[in-house]
Image (spheres, coloured by chain):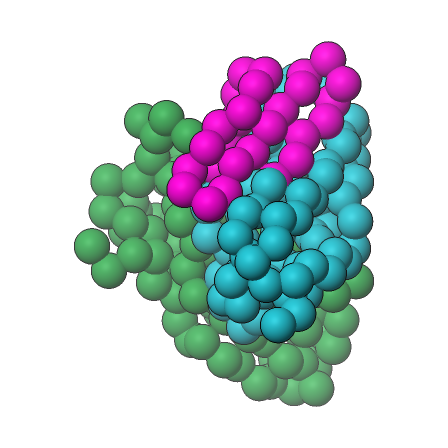
Chain colours: A cyan, B green
Amino acid sequence: GQSLEQPSEVTAVEGAIVQINCTYQTSGFYGLSWYQQHDGGAPTFLSYNALDGLEETGRFSSFLSRSDSYGYLLLQELQMKDSASYFCAVRRDDKIIFGKGTRLHILP
Amino acid sequence: DAGVIQSPRHEVTEMGQEVTLRCKPISGHDYLFWYRQTMMRGLELLIYFNNNVPIDDSGMPEDRFSAKMPNASFSTLKIQPSEPRDSAVYFCASKSDRSTYNEQFFGPGTRLTVL
């Protein structure tokens, strides 16, 4: 089987930096993805890490440590529009298994 | 491209009725996935297809659920008979086998309410 753990909620201030952690247990691991979902919307892809290290895309970065079965999503220069749920997801073969998501609240 | 298209966007039905959800994937994508999202259970993979062939249906909750993909442009998820506990948002997603980042593209979802 597989399991993913991420905090259910995180609160941060506009303009600040926030890190959302994800730990996983799975067999046949191929990589870790992150998706964003706004209320009433569909999940949208943010990043994918297949190898250890940091991947940067604009204000967002994602990190993976395969030996620790751990990853995180880093959001910098937070904006109010970043208020959403963030899901980590592990890739197994052709499919991905999603965590329960982290609700990010941003205070002005 | 218009992205993944789902219909209907909202469906309200009574317990015992048949429900059919529809999905048109992005043209050229090889994979199609059906997910169900609820507050309690999160985002669950129900079934996925590769080149129109069902590969893994282990997430389908029970025999009341069935999915088909008669061609590369169309898929259906059917619930018969529907029950109140089936109320959820159902997402369809597609991806290309050539994607470097294994990115899945989600449709807008169908919000199903079973009374």
How many labels, in total?
A: 0
Judge from the rendering whether residue B32 lies leftward or rightward of residue A14; answer left or right.
left
Kindly indicate the quadrant of the structure image that contains residue B88: bottom right
Q: Residue furthest front?
A: A15
Residue B68 seen in the current view? no
Q: Nearer the viewer, residue B26 or A4?
A: A4
Q: Residue furthest top?
A: A67
Kindly indicate the quadrant of the structure image that contains residue A84: bottom right
Q: Is residue B68 magenta?
A: no
Give the image location of residue A51, x and y in percent: 54, 16
Judge from the rendering whether residue A107 lies leftward or rightward of residue B95; answer left or right.
right
A48, above or below A6, in the image: above
Q: Where does the magenta region start and end? A: A47-73
Give the image location of residue B41, x and y in percent: 76, 57
Judge from the rendering whether residue A47 lies leftward or rightward of residue B64; answer left or right.
left
Q: Residue at x 65, y 86 (%)?
A: B14
Q: Main secondary structure of the magenta part?
A: strand
B74, above or below B83, in the image: above
